[in-house]
Every structure is written in structure tokens, then in C-alpha cells.
Amino acid sequence: MKKLFLALASAILFGAATMATPASAGPPEELPIDDYIVLFPDVNVNRSVFINITAQDFCAWLADGEGPPPAIETVDGRLNITGSGAAVASIDADLYIEMWEFDENPSPLIGPCEDIQQQLDAGSGPWATGVAKWKAKTNNLFESDARSNTFGERTTAVLVDQDGNTWNYRNVFHLNFSCNFPGEAPPSCLVDNSSLRQR
């Protein structure tokens, strides 16, 4: 559920960053977003993932509490208002990614900084860094009555660890908000799969 929470938070961040108002149908609009970041604990591979921001910068910004998050680069989003009034938003970008091992195994998943705090305090760097092909899409950004919202994201990355080894990482996350949410259990239609393999 922690992965679910942070993935949904990234969807909310996308909505806040666009600051768009669904007015009427028209051609797709390109929207540069200068504070777009993604972070989540991937318990499938026991790593903490930071995309388009470093963990050090994120945690310093979180402690400071001022201004937008210091994203590494501006991300181009795409927004299309359909004839029914639903806002379809997507991102497809190549972005910096870094992964950290959790301080504990298994991690208690307290928070993105707390989970790696011992390494941050020691001045350690991330376990691995690289470039990720990041794709995200929501078909009803402003949650109009036109349709049920579905949100999905796909990360495909090549990373190099501190020992010089190269790794392939893949994560797929998808959720339909009209499916069954059975209390504390994961939603019945939740897809959350990952793989991390040395090349």
C-alpha cells in the first residue's frame, strides 16, 4: 500500500503541476512542468527510487519546506480535453534515475528520506544511477463524471551501480479507480510488477 500511496501522490503532483482547467475539447496541449519528480519505494526489488531528482536534494528540500521541489530538468507533459470533458494527461520522457538500498531489510517504509537516512547521514551515494524511460498516463485527470479514472506508469531503466555493474530495471504500475478497494487489502485490479537484473 505504501507504493500505491506514493504512486498516487505522483499523479496528484502531475495534476497540480499542470494547473490546467478543463474547458472544452481541442487539440492536445503541450505543458512544460519544471517541478515534476517521481519517488517511490519498490518493495519488489528492495530499493528506493528517485526520478528527476536526487535523494539528497529531495530530502534537503523536504526539510526546508520552501518553494517547488528541485527537479533536475523540465518535463514536457501532454494534455487533451476530450469531447466528453475528460482530461487525458500523459508524460513520456527520458529522465535521471537513482536507486538506494533500504537501510533495513525488510524496510519499515517510514518515508522516502527516513528509509535511507543512515546512508544520507554517512554521506553515501545511491546504490545505482542511470537514465529511465518514464511513461505515465491518466485518462481523467480532473476526475470528471465523464469516465472512471485509470492511472498507469512504466519505468524502464539502465543503471550502473557503485561497483560498475550494469543493471536493467523495469516497473509497471496500473490502477483503475472503478475497481474494488477491499479495505486494507490492495485493490483488486492493481498491477505493480518490477524486475531488476544484472546485465
Image (tube, rainbow, N blue to C red):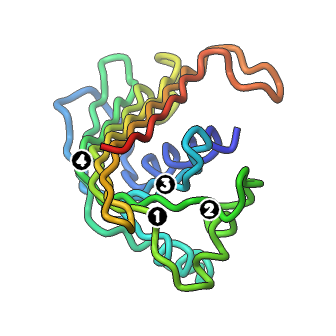
Q: Is residue 195 left or right of residue 157?
A: right
- Could you tell which of marks 3 and 2 lies nearer the N-terminus? 3
Q: Give me the residue at 54% from left, 81% from top.
A: 60
Label 3 belongs to which residue? 49
Dot 4 amino acid type:
Ala
Query: How far separated are the C-alphas under marks 4 and 3?
Result: 16 Å
Q: Nearer the viewer, residue 195 or 146?
A: 195
Label 4 belongs to which residue? 93
> In the rendering, which numbered label is found on residue 127?
1
Q: Secondary structure at mark 4?
A: strand
Q: Is residue 192 left or right of residue 26?
A: right
- Could you tell which of marks 4 and 1 lies nearer the N-terminus? 4
Query: How far separated are the C-alphas under marks 2 and 1?
Result: 15 Å
> In the rendering, which numbered label is found on residue 112?
2
Residue 56: where, in percent of width, then height? Answer: 49, 77
Query: How far separated are the C-alphas under marks 1 and 3?
Result: 10 Å
Q: Secondary structure at mark 2?
A: loop
Q: Is residue 35 above or below residue 15?
A: below
Dot 1 amino acid type:
Trp
Query: How far separated are the C-alphas under marks 4 and 1?
Result: 23 Å
> In the rendering, which numbered label is found on residue 89?
none
- Could you tell which of marks 4 and 3 lies nearer the N-terminus? 3
Check disc 1: other Cα within 10 Å, few if <14, some if 14-19, many if 20+: some
- Could you tell which of marks 1 and 3 lies nearer the N-terminus? 3
